[in-house]
Every structure is written in structure tokens, then in C-alpha cells.
Image: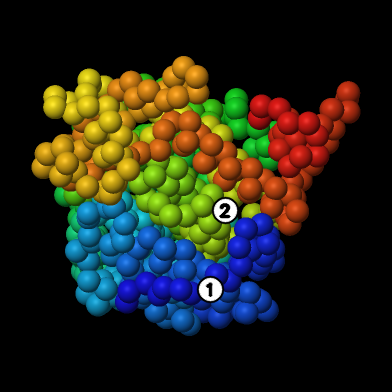
């Protein structure tokens, strides 16, 4: 289905975001319940707004999920991005009909039926999200196990894979069932050209009530996922973010306790994926929450920016806390570079990622707020830590002098022409340009860079590093302002001196209640 054009927006700016956050903070979105509790008209406006924002830059198809028949807590309109309508020359090869068939066959392979779902299209590659692999408990009796183990936390699910040693007949039956179900999951991954699987779980298998209640690709006994590049990048679950809130929303210096009994998944990344990053991965257990999130994001950006055509899957356990954190950061970072959602303003990309990546994919904000597990707030406040060029997906190339045969005036004329064209230079290179302030307020073009056409053609005229910073700061400021008026921060007990906490102080300045300062 091609994107609808001329569709009037359901709302704009601060009012639309405030309405979204209010609805988000009142009830969890569930497609099977018609979108949530009591606010169906509002939910429908949110859904329409997401489709309108996707349609600004992409042709897309929709997989219908009106009553949660595909997945109970995925969007009622699951969007398959097919082609960027702007400068990006890449196009997805995925056909919605075949994708839908593979989804229906494979959805039981993953916890809560949260199948591998493409959510971002970048250079023709699908960036996907899902839950982790399900075990026999869910496959044989989803309803009973869901009742027993559904405690509302990200890690609560029931798929006990291990069974008694003496019951070998049942074990053989299990093996055949896993071959079939996980085989469909693998077919879906391959159809989406996913090669890289990033597992955020801190456990090999989740243990609850003494049982192994989830599995993952990295511990699949039959090595069914051996052909994929498996990355174990353990990241704290939503419970850890209560400590973030209790520390006055300060992530600096907050280090996860890796010595806890249930933590048994070490960091494991193929060496070929770390060589281009100047990171000492052996030190990961000493990183605070800022460093850990920064380094994992750098890794993900490096993977999707590689020269191959392979896609990426990111998942945690249920796929609705840590997973949207990194999906949202990826979407915002690529947007800030001018590489995806190119026509969206800061308020619009903020609305889209809050609505689609968090709300419509079932993040349990009501439950998380009640427990002080503010991973959702952390995501958008964290944008201040990824504004620099080191997080940019735009490849750095050595600056070179003006190409032979081109004058400065001709270069300027090229910039004013169709920005997607590279034929004025050659079929092999596109031209990027930097400007720097010159005398008397004029601009002199001091350097250009040559970039291979094709993979980077859509990035021929990129936002500068300062633009990236300002764009992300606009998103963060808009979020903080709207969040304060709708949900609000939970104040921590004042210090003996009665000082306002660090982030609260930053916040009142950020929304204009005090004089501005550097946040």
C-alpha cells in the first residue's frame, strides 16, 4: 500500500505530544483490546498520525493487526517501509504478502508472540525488533504460563525449556517442535536479510521461580542460529532504572552490579565487528550507564553502516523496555544525521518515536512509573550524550582539495541544483562540502570530500556536526517540556542543604522557569 498523501495531521507540536503522553501514562496499548482502555478515539488519532508521518518520506505497506490477531501488543497497523521517496536510492526487496505469511508461521517462536518486526529502513536494510526466543512452556500452554508468570516486568515470561531427564520421548517431541517453529523464525530472519542479532539479555536464560523461563539464540542447543552473527551485549533491565531515578535521574557514575547470581551472559562480540571502534570491551563491567549506552549505540551504528546489505535485529526478553530504548536512539541518531525521515521536524520525529517505538509496541509506562523504573524518560534525556560527531553514521573521509576542473563558483552551483544528483561530477563520486565563516560575514568553502556514490549517495549533502547537536537538543528539550506538563518527574528527597537535585535543576532551566544555562 502506498502512503496516503494530503492526510490532515491529527495534531501538531506541543499539543499533540502532550495528548500522546497523557494517553500513554494512563493505559498500556494492546491491539487485542482495541488499542487501550477507554481512549479509542485518541488512540486512533495517534495511529493515524504515525501513518501520516511515515508517509512523509516513505512508501509503505501495512500488515493489519486490528484485533491483535497477529500480535496482541504490537500496533494495529504494522508498518513495512518499502522505499524512501526522497534521495535514498535503496529499496526493500520484501513483499508484504510473503512477509505476512512468514510472520504467521513464525510468531510462536518468540515470547508473547512478539515476532521479528522491521521498524527502520536504512540504506535498504531492515532494522528489526522482537522478543527473545520462546521455550516449550509457551508453545505447549501459553495461556496457563502467561497467567502464572505475568508480573508486569520486562523479564516476566514463561517458557521453561528444560524438562525432566527421564522423559526422553517428550524431549524428542520438543526437539521436533523447536525445529519447526524456530525454523520458521530463521526463514523470517533470512527473508528480511537479517544477519546480525543483538541480544541485550543479561541472562543466558531467564530464571523465575526456579525454572528457566526464556531461551535465546546464543544458547539454542541445536545451534540453529549458528549462521548468524550473534552478539551478546548484556544491558540492565528496567528494574535498574529505579536506581537511576533514585539518584536524581543521574546516569553518570551509575554502574550495574554484574556479580548478581542471575547474571550469567558475558559480553560476546565477533572481533570483526569491534576492530573499527576504539573501545576496550574488556572493561564493560566497569562502565557506568552513560558509557555503556554510548558504546552499545556506537556498535549498532557501526553494524548498520557496514558495506554489506545485511539487516539487524535488536531484542531483550519481552522486547518492550531495553529494545525500544535502542531502537528509538537509533532512529533519532540517524534522523539527526539527515539519513532517515528527512522531512520531519524535531517535534514530528519525537512524536513518531514515542508513539510507534514505545506506545504502540506495548511499553508498560503505567507499570514502570508506579515502580520508579524510568527507562522511558532515560531514553530521551540521554540524547544530550550522543550529540557529537562520533555517534554519526556518516562515514568520515579525508578532506581533499577542489576536484580538478571545478571552480568554487561551479561547486556552489552544484549545491543549489538537485541534491540527489551526482552526475555533474562523475558516475563514481558525489561531492560533500563544508563551509566555514569567512571575513565580513561571508562564507568560504574551505574543503570538500569525495564519497563513493551508491551507498552514501543519499548523504551527499549532510547536516553538519553542529546541526546534529542542535537537532537532538531540540528533540530533548521538547520532550522535557512536554513530559513535565503531563507526567512529571518524581522528586527525590532534598539534600540537607535543601538544594534541588541535579536533573530537576537542569529541567526548570530547560523549560524556561529559570535563566538559561548549559545543560
Kindly identify the residue that appears in the image at 50 percent across and 19 percent down. 440
In the rendered image, the quadrant that contains the C terminus is top right
Residue 269, position in %: x, y?
A: 29, 35
Q: Quadrant of residue 257?
A: top right
Q: Quadrant of residue 394?
A: top left
Kindly identify the residue that appears in the image at 32 percent across and 67 percent down. 59
Residue 286 appears in the figure:
no
Kindly identify the residue that appears in the image at 45 percent across and 24 percent down. 442
Q: Helix, strand, or loop for circle 1?
A: loop
Residue placed farthest to the left in the image? 427
Q: Earlier in the sequence, mark 1 or mark 2?
A: 1
Q: Which residue is mark 1?
A: 8
CB atoms at circles 1 and 2 under 8 Å apart? no
Tell me the crowding category of disc 2: few under 14, some 14 to 19, or many 20 or more residues within 10 angstroms, Cα based.
many
Tell me the crowding category of disc 1: few under 14, some 14 to 19, or many 20 or more residues within 10 angstroms, Cα based.
few
Residue placed farthest to the top in the image? 439
Q: Nearer the viewer, mark 1 or mark 2?
A: 1
Q: Which residue is mark 2?
A: 347
In the rendered image, the quadrant that contains the N terminus is bottom left
Residue 294 appears in the figure:
yes
Kindly identify the residue that appears in the image at 32 percent across and 43 percent down. 416
- Front residue of this view, candidates 343 and 70: 343
**Residue 489 sits above or below residue 364 on the image:** above
Q: Helix, strand, or loop for circle 2?
A: helix
- Front residue of this view, candidates 21 and 441: 441
Residue 488, position in %: x, y?
A: 75, 50
Amino acid at each position: 500500500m502506498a502512503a496516503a498523501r494530503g492526510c490532515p495531521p491529527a495534531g501538531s507540536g506541543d499539543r499533540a505530544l502532550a495528548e500522546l503522553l497523557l494517553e500513554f501514562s494512563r493505559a498500556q496499548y494492546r491491539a487485542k483490546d482495541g488499542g487501550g482502555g477507554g481512549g479509542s478515539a485518541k488512540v486512533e488519532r495517534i495511529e493515524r498520525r504515525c501513518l501520516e508521518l511515515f508517509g512523509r518520506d516513505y512508501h509503505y505497506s501495512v500488515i493489519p493487526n486490528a484485533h491483535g490477531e497477529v500480535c496482541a501488543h504490537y500496533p494495529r497497523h504494522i508498518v513495512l517501509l518499502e522505499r524512501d521517496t526522497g534521495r535514498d536510492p535503496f529499496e526493500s526487496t520484501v513483499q508484504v504478502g510473503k512477509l505476512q505469511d512468514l510472520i504467521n508461521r513464525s510468531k510462536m517462536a518468540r515470547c508473547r508472540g512478539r515476532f521479528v518486526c522491521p521498524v527502520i529502513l536504512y540504506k535498504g536494510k531492515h532494522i528489526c525488533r522482537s522478543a527473545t526466543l520462546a521455550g516449550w512452556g509457551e508453545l505447549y500452554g501459553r495461556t496457563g504460563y502467561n497467567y502464572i508468570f505475568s508480573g508486569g516486568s520486562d523479564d516476566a515470561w514463561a517458557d521453561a525449556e528444560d524438562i525432566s531427564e527421564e522423559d526422553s520421548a517428550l524431549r524428542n517431541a520438543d526437539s521436533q517442535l523447536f525445529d519447526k517453529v524456530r525454523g520458521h523464525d530463521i526463514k523470517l530472519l533470512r527473508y528480511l536479510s537479517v544477519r546480525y542479532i543483538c541480544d541485550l539479555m543479561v541472562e543466558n536464560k531467564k530464571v523465575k521461580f526456579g525454572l528457566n523461563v526464556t531461551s535465546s539464540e546464543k544458547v539454542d542447543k541445536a545451534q540453529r542460529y549458528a549462521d548468524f552473527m550473534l552478539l551478546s551485549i548484556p544491558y540492565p533491565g528496567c528494574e535498574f532504572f529505579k536506581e537511576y531515578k533514585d539518584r536524581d535521574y543521574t546516569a553518570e557514575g551509575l554502574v550495574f552490579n554484574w556479580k548478581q547470581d542471575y547474571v550469567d551472559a558475558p559480553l560476546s562480540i565477533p572481533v570483526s565487528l569491534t576492530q573499527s571502534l576504539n573501545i576496550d570491551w574488556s572493561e564493560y563491567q566497569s562502565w557506568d550507564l552513560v558509557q555503556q549506552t554510548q558504546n552499545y549505540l556506537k556498535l549498532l551504528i557501526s553494524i548498520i553502516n557496514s558495506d554489506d546489505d545485511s539487516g539487524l535485529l535488536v531484542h531483550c526478553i519481552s522486547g518492550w523496555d531495553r529494545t525500544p530504548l535502542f531502537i528509538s536512539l537509533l532512529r533519532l541518531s540517524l534522523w539527526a544525521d539527515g539519513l532517515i525521515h528527512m522531512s520531519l521536524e524535531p517535534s514530528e520525529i519525537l512524536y513518531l518515536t514515542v508513539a510507534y517505538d514505545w506506545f504502540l509496541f506495548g511499553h508498560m509506562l503505567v507499570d514502570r512509573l508506579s515502580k520508579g523504573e524510568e527507562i522511558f524518560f532515560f531514553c530521551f534525556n540521554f540524547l544530550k550524550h550522543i550529540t557529537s560527531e562520533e555517534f554519526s553514521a556518516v562515514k568520515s573521509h579525508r578532506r581533499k582539495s577542489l576536484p580538478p576542473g571545478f571552480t568554487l563558483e561551479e561547486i556552489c552551483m552544484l549545491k543549489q541544483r538537485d541534491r540527489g544528483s551526482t552526475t555533474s561530477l562523475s558516475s563514481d563520486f558525489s561531492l560533500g562540502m563544508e563551509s566555514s565563516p569567512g571575513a565580513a560575514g561571508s562564507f568560504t568553502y574551505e574543503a570538500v570530500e569525495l564519497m563513493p556514490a551508491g551507498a552514501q549517495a543519499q548523504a551527499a549533502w549532510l547536516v553538519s556536526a553542529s546541526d546534529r547537536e542542535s537537532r537532538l537538543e531540540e528533540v530533548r528539550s521538547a520532550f522535557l517540556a512536554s513530559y513535565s506538563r503531563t507526567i512529571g518527574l518524581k522528586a527525590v528527597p532534598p539534600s540537607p542543604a535543601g538544594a534541588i537535585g541535579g536533573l530537576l535543576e537542569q529541567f526548570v532551566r530547560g523549560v524556561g522557569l529559570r535563566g538559561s544555562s548549559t545543560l
